[in-house]
Amino acid sequence: MAKIAIGIDIGGTGIKGALVNIKKGELASERLRVETPPGGRPDDIAEVVRELITALDPNRVAGAIGICFPAVVQHGVTKSAANVSKEWIGLDADKLFTGVIGKPVHLINDADAAGVAEMKFGVGRKFKGLVMVTTLGTGIGTAMFIDGQLVPNTELGHIEIDGVDYETKAAFSAKERENLDWRQWAARLQTYYSKLENLFTPDLFVVGGGVSKEHEDFLPLLRLQTAIVPAKLKNTAGIIGAALVASKLSK
Ligand code: BGC
């Protein structure tokens, strides 16, 4: 397996990328970031991703380029679009990116990518049982692992509570949009994680997303039966996980 791979993390607000040392689970270059083009349309995003990859010196890398995306991704086709353009729904995104970039790519859901990285190199390392990795950002992403094995595309950020898609209440973007303080936001997280706990009885919750670096302000406010810990890889998890999955496939 090649040691250096490229990981790209497409988000609702920014697109990030880096070379990744997939043996160590570390970035092997600077982390580049560009704004997501307004509207989040497929052609515009593909062009920005191409520019990012060019800046990363792709000739150093042999295998497929890993890309993670904030939607359901099944066999390279994007099947939902909560915080990006609806034009992604039903699109063969793998084909679009491969065409624009001129190299093979492998696309997966962003939370699944972050989860894979956390399970291999972060807090979930060697953890057995049912682990739910959650990412709190523009939306809520979830990745579920049973004895380290991913069950892809769980999309539990969209669980309805009291008739509302709960990511609109408990994502980090809701805290910012509604100007909630930590306590007010934690009350919503309490509702959200209690719901997951009632439905799945996990052994561990992992909390990722940019806000996880401020975990001391909100995790201690939660009262759960399940252990809940901050992610270790912070804002590099998606990049590392996408690169890792792609490089395994092109071994
Ligand atoms: C999307 C998921 C994504 C999550 C985090 C949700 O709105 O439906 O696919 O993983 O946001 O970006």
Image (cartoon, helix red, strand yellow):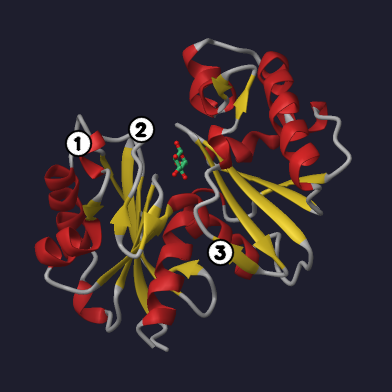
Which quarter of the frame holds ligand 1?
top left
Viewer-closest of 103 and 22: 103
Residue that numbered label 1 is attached to: 37
Eyeballing the image, is 149 above or below 36?
below
Q: Quadrant of the N terminus?
A: bottom left
Eyeballing the image, is 246 above or below 205?
below
Upstream in sequence: badge 1 or badge 2: 1
Upstream in sequence: badge 3 or badge 2: 2
User: Are there few (<14), some (14-19), or many (20+) residues within 10 Å of tag 3?
Assistant: many
Q: Amino acid at mark 1?
A: Pro
Residue at figure coordinates x 20%, y 39% from the top left: 87
Q: Amino acid at mark 3?
A: Val
Viewer-closest of 236 and 81: 81
Residue 220 found in image quarter:
top right
The circle drawn on residue 116 is 3
Residue that numbered label 2 is attached to: 83
Q: What is the spatial separation of the Cα atoms under label 1 and label 3, in whole angstroms?
A: 27 Å
User: Are there few (<14), some (14-19), or many (20+) residues within 10 Å of tag 2?
Assistant: some
Q: What is the spatial separation of the Cα atoms under label 3 and label 2, in whole angstroms?
A: 22 Å
Position in image of residue 103 (x %, y %): 17, 73
Q: Is mark 2 within 8 Å of ligand 1?
A: yes
Q: What is the spatial separation of the Cα atoms under label 1 and label 2, in whole angstroms?
A: 13 Å
Position in image of residue 99 (x %, y %): 11, 65
Per the image, label 1 sits on a secondary structure element best described as loop
Residue reaching furthest to the right = 225
